[in-house]
Amino acid sequence: ATPTAVMVATGVGANNGVLIKGGDALERAQRVKYVIFDKTGTLTQGKATVTTAKSFTGMERGEFLKLVASAEHSGEFIEDSYRIFPYFLPSCLLNFLNSVTARASSEHPLAKAILSYARHFHFFDDSSADTGTENDAGNDVKTDFSALPGRGVQCLIDGKRILVGNRKLMAENGIHISTEVENFVVELEESAKTGILVAYNDILTGVLGIADPLKREASVVIEGLQKMGVTPVMVTGDNWRTARAVAKEVSIQDVRAEVMPAGKADVVRSFQKDGSIVAMVGDGINDSPALAAADVGMAIGAGTDIAIEAADYVLMRNNLEDVITAIDLSRKTFSRIR
Ligand code: ADP
Ligand code: MG
């Protein structure tokens, strides 16, 4: 009866947008003791918006935003990839195709926020986006772009170095942060926002404040897990202050912040030490080692393809309630077999 029950459960899952890659993953989910949530794009909507953009060097606002947007632009942005797939496909399948093919989803949520803000105010225009090649329209030429997971991005614009990211990125590059700037960033972080620092030509030029609202169901799901005897944990590459403010809003007690991408997998392993079964829920490239290390890796369907590949479960609806659905499904399936 076992294979049949597993097949039925897999079908029930699929009908609810919970894709399960195999019977082992389905079996393990019933014994999950800890669920480790990534913050950005998992607990939060991943629809970050810029709330503040401040230059500290007197650089004109438009100039500042154009510079930051150019730096964040990966040159691979596909605005609406639905267009490339037949519209009559079920929306669940469209979302899936979208998430595994669109480069848009491989861009960091913070980069998306900065780009959409700059586009909205017409400080940045994709048609003039820098490609790294000579450009006769007189646009700034961008070269040597690299995304630095857990830290930010860096590139050269017109031969001058620009760094966009967190304190760690600035520290690694020897960028001095004045007390005025530090105080400004602390204030953002205490209100659950992420402060992004910008250094141009080795000088701290300005700061962006980014807010990413929690998913509506986040608190209910955390409470639900606790009632099921499962302990929720939050892990993030974001700074401690922002992390604590967000965790407090959803009543997560155990928080791990300023964790580098490889470190997320270590966090998973630390919870597995006493033999506990650990689930990891994440959406980003930087979550994939942790998703692979977890006993039960759950990728948000709207996340990056690499995360989806590394996971045992794909939550297509991008709804955290499906974490509970998945554990319930496993518990029901295996209590029936036993
Ligand atoms: P999370 O673990 O919450 O998903 P990440 O590990 O992706 O967060 O990022 C951690 C931190 O690194 C961010 O909070 C931000 O400070 C910085 N960062 C990462 N990518 C970028 C980017 N593209 N632009 C600016 N800052 C970034
Ligand atoms: Mg994330």
Image (tube, rainbow, N blue to C red):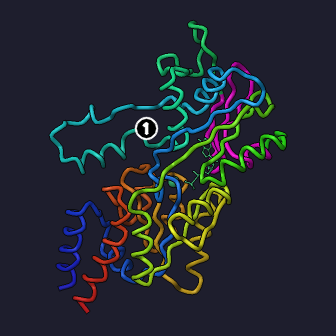
Q: Count every numbered label the image shows and give the total.
A: 1
If the image is split into quadrants, where does the C terminus sit? bottom left
- Residue 292, x across and y down, in percent: 49, 65
Q: Is residue 309 left or right of residue 49?
A: left
Q: Quadrant of residue 184?
A: top right
* Residue beneath the point at 47% across and 49% down: 46
- The image shows residue 172, relative to residue 64, as above or below, that is below
- The image shows residue 293, relative to residue 147, as above or below, that is below
The residue lying toward the viewer, choosing from 82 and 198, is 198
Q: Residue furthest bottom?
A: 338
Q: Is residue 300 left or right of residue 273?
A: left
* Residue beneath the point at 17% across and 79% down: 4
- Residue 285, x across and y down, in percent: 51, 51
* Residue beneath the point at 18% across and 47% down: 90
Magenta span dominant secondary structure: strand
Q: How many residues crowd mark 1 within 10 Å: few (<14), some (14–19), many (20+)?
A: many
Q: Secondary structure at mark 1?
A: helix
* Residue beneath the point at 59% across and 64% down: 264
- The image shows residue 264, relative to residue 159, as above or below, that is below
Q: Which residues are magenta?
A: 144-171
The residue lying toward the viewer, choosing from 319 and 213, is 213
The residue lying toward the viewer, choosing from 325 and 30, is 325
- Residue 316, x across and y down, in percent: 31, 56
- Residue 273, x across and y down, in percent: 59, 82
- Residue labelled with disc 1: 104
Q: Amino acid at mark 1?
A: Ala
Q: Is residue 152 magenta?
A: yes
Q: Residue furthest left?
A: 88
Q: Quadrant of residue 209?
A: top right
